Image (spheres, rainbow, N blue to C red):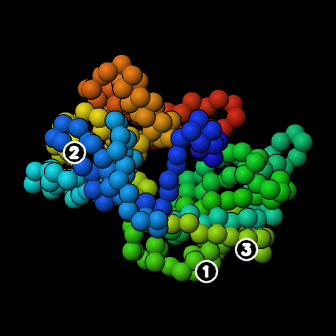
């Protein structure tokens, strides 16, 4: 989906730059006027009328040219994240199946939460059930084993080969695959996957009150808002920000109100499994 979004942006004359690190956000008090960034092609200054940030709050606050008040920095530096390791396993078949009148078929779940206390694995994804286009050979099964961890801890620090061996052994031990059925594997580590609601999060309002004074800076997305939003909520904050710009609205209350209900439920639509997230 995002490859298609990128294609359309470029088709309309937009430019997408990757490999840059934002070093400094320049402002004149109430408005951001430019962003300084460095990358493989050197240092550049990007000027603009409006700015959107999906960067982790800590990184944004550290890059502001006007140093925030001590209490705001204290809250920012005290925010906590959970990190994430995914082990992708391509397998010939699973040991578990859905029983149908036509026989055994691939289980229909997108996600399976692992409850066994003697494994480190937290969740299992079946990419076949997200889209058949994610699997080159429909006769195989593409799995994602998800390990929740902290950057630098024991799981995060395992070498790729050790991580794959752990994933294969655990999934075999709980009866989902045979290790001999694994055809290929890959390991992906993702920092700051889950913004956590502890640390200094109970004082997050102090950050919001400070950063919202920049009328042309919009914080959107999971890390940008330090909120455990689902993808649809993250996209909605960005779309609402654009609506605000078009309407000349500088108040950002509607953005911060997205997904504030205590529970969010994805209704089952007949093609996927039902899940909920707090």
Number of other residues with Cα within 10 Å of mark 2, as a class: few under 14, some 14 to 19, many 20 or more = some
Write down the residue under mark 1.
161
Q: Is residue 166 left or right of residue 29?
A: right
Q: Quadrant of residue 191?
A: bottom left
Position of residue 194 measured from the top left corner of the image (x, y, whole percent): 41, 53
For the point 9% across and 54% down, the residue is 70
Q: Quadrant of residue 218?
A: top left
Against 142, is 103 above or below?
above
Q: Contact, CB < 8 Å: mark 2 with mark 1?
A: no
Position of residue 219 measured from the top left corner of the image (x, y, whole percent): 33, 41
Front position among marks 1 and 3: 1
Q: Quadrant of the N terminus?
A: top right
The label number, if any, that marks residue 58 in the structure image: none
Q: Earlier in the sequence, mark 2 or mark 1?
A: 2
Position of residue 152 measured from the top left corner of the image (x, y, whole percent): 39, 74
Q: Is residue 227 left or right of residue 33?
A: right
Front position among marks 2 and 1: 2
Against 191, is 50 above or below?
above
Dot 2: element: strand
Against 235, is 96 above or below?
below
Write down the residue under mark 3.
179
């Amino acid at each position: 989906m995002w490859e298609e979004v990128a294609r359309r942006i470029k088709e309309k004359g937009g430019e997408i730059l990757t490999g840059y690190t934002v070093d400094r956000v320049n402002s004149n008090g109430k408005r951001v006027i430019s962003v300084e960034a460095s990358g493989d092609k050197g240092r550049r200054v990007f000027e603009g009328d409006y700015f959107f940030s999906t960067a982790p709050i800590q990184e944004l606050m550290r890059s502001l040219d006007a140093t925030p008040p001590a209490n705001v920095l204290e809250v920012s530096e005290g925010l906590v994240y959970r990190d994430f390791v995914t082990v992708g396993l391509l397998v010939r078949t699973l040991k578990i199946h859905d029983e149908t009148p036509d026989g055994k078929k691939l289980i229909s779940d997108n996600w399976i939460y692992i409850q066994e206390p003697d494994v480190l694995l937290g969740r299992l994804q079946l990419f076949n059930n997200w889209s058949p286009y994610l699997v080159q050979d429909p006769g195989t099964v593409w799995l994602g084993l998800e390990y929740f961890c902290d950057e630098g801890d024991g799981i995060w620090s395992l070498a790729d080969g050790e991580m794959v061996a752990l994933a294969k052994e655990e999934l075999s031990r709980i009866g989902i695959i045979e290790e001999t059925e694994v055809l290929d594997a890959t390991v992906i580590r993702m920092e700051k996957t889950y913004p956590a609601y502890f640390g200094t999060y109970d004082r997050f309002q102090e950050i919001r009150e400070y950063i919202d004074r920049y009328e042309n800076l919009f914080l959107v997305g999971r890390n940008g808002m330090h909120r455990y939003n689902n993808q649809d909520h993250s996209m909605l904050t960005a779309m609402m920000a654009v609506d605000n710009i078009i309407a000349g609205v500088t108040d950002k209350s509607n953005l911060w109100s997205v997904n504030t209900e205590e529970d969010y439920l994805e209704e089952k639509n007949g093609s996927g499994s039902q899940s909920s997230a707090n």
